[in-house]
Image (tube, coloured by chain):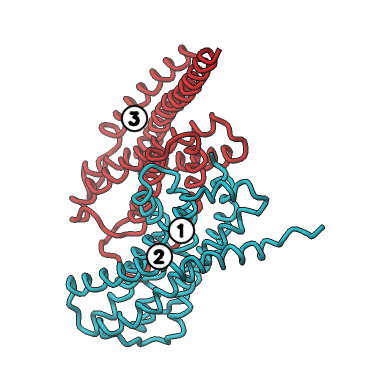
Amino acid sequence: MKILFKSCLVLTALLLGYGFCQAMYIAPTEATMGDVQRIFYYHLPSAWVAFLLFFVNFLASVWYLIRRSVAADAMALASAEVGVSFCTIVLITGPIWARPIWGIWWTWDARLTSTLVLWLIYVSYLVLRHYASGGQVPVLAAALGIFGFVDVPIVYMAIRWFRTQHPQPVIGGGQGSGLDPTMWHAVLWNLAAFAMLAFMFVWVRYRQAIVEHELEEAHAQASLDYETEGAQ
Amino acid sequence: MTSAPSLWAITRRSLVKDLRLEWRSKDAINSMLFFALLVVVIFSFGFDPTAEESRKIAGGLLWVAILFATVVALNQTWTREIRNQVMDAYRLSPAPPQALFLSKTIGNFIFVSILEVLMVPLFVVFYNLRSVGPVWQLLVVALLATWALVVNGTFFAALSIRTRSREIMLPLILFPISIPALLAMVDATTSILTGDNSPIFWMRLLAVYDLVFTTVSLVLFEPVVNAE
């Protein structure tokens, strides 16, 4: 297990390094935006990884309510935490790009707004996990995780309609359909690297959650043994 | 041997009990009303709109005021039951938990509706409102929107009483999930008031939201109420 973990760690580092070279040196400079566009190679993979992790959180939540397995709860926690981190990267890299290109940090465009709402939903999930205590946390969290995920398509529909009714405040929001093949390379390599990075984070957090649970059980067992000894 | 009472019978009895309690104490309604009144007055200090402007912003102000006031009422929904271990009694009884959830939701729906009936005239007076679109549509929007607020609110109130900081927890988990519903109710109301756009899409969205979350709440309420 340890060897597997270490080799995965090395693989992640290599992928991140190669992805960095691809994004910074090999991919051509974008014609109108210049070097600023290179942040896109980190922005897009982070977004995809975050969305994937939120989906994993939903599956783990459902699985927990069906089976009440500790592993599912640990997975739900790990995926939500790492998902929120990656979603934060998306929300930070976006404005950094938007400021020089659109001239504004933020606009209430459909994609931006839905990502922000998504981020808010999963932050509230983490807040609930933090404030709840005892054995009921996993059930409450799983319920909220399912609520959050069910909300996503409704959020998306509402916000798309909300924005299409109003004129777009900025011109040329989309990336356009024609990506240069070397740009695609950079995107895909970074996607692989970020997926691997997220996987490693989830792995570590998952193990931690499991160990934490085992520790709690051991403590409870120890105090129980102590009490029975005292009674004798 | 008599057969077990139906889901609806249990819901009704629990609802009647809640309404009677509220009628005698008036805890929820009074605090909610005064809170909403404060919000309206403070808003009208914050903005000083003309009749044309107020038509555009009144939808947002009204629903935000109602949302805040609803949270005040929702927080009291379950605390009453916790105090005398009524929740434990419910857990032990063979009554389906869905009946408990439905009665609480319907109860909150009634309280918030009363609040709205009292608040809307106030808004009309303070903000000098006159609707351009048909008023009956506002009624439909109000019914759908109120249900959207209370169905999730009642569920999340049951979640948040299990946490350490109960009163703060509820808005923190309720608001993010309610964003699409809030967007829909505000935009539908504004569309009707100004008569600029059709509110039909937003009404449909609210209906879908109500349907989806009523179902999810009913399914998930049992594990939540039984979590020790």
Front disc: 1 or 3: 1
- Number of the label disc, if any, that sits on residue B20: none
Residue B180 in the image: state x and y as whole percent. Answer: 41, 61
Mark 1 — residue? B77
| Residue A179 in view | no
Viewer-proximal residue among A165 and A88: A88
Q: Which shade of the palette goes to chain B?
A: cyan
Residue B76 at x, y = what percent? 42, 58
Q: Judge whether B24 appears above or below A146 on screen.
A: below
Measure how far apart labels 1 and 3 are at the Cα level. Answer: 53 Å
Q: What residue is shown at x 28% (from left), y 39% (from top)?
A: A28
Question: What is the spatial separation of the Cα atoms under label 1 and label 2, in whole angstroms?
Answer: 8 Å
Q: Secondary structure at mark 1?
A: helix
Q: Tell me whether circle 1 and circle 2 mark residues in contact (CB < 8 Å).
A: yes
Residue annotated with mark 3: A19
SS assignment at label 3: helix
Query: In the image, which disc is placed on residue B28?
Result: 2
* Chain A shade in the render: red
- Relative to B196, residue A78 above or below: above
The chain letter under disc 2 is B
Disc 2 marks which amino acid? Ala
Percent x, y for residue B79? 44, 53
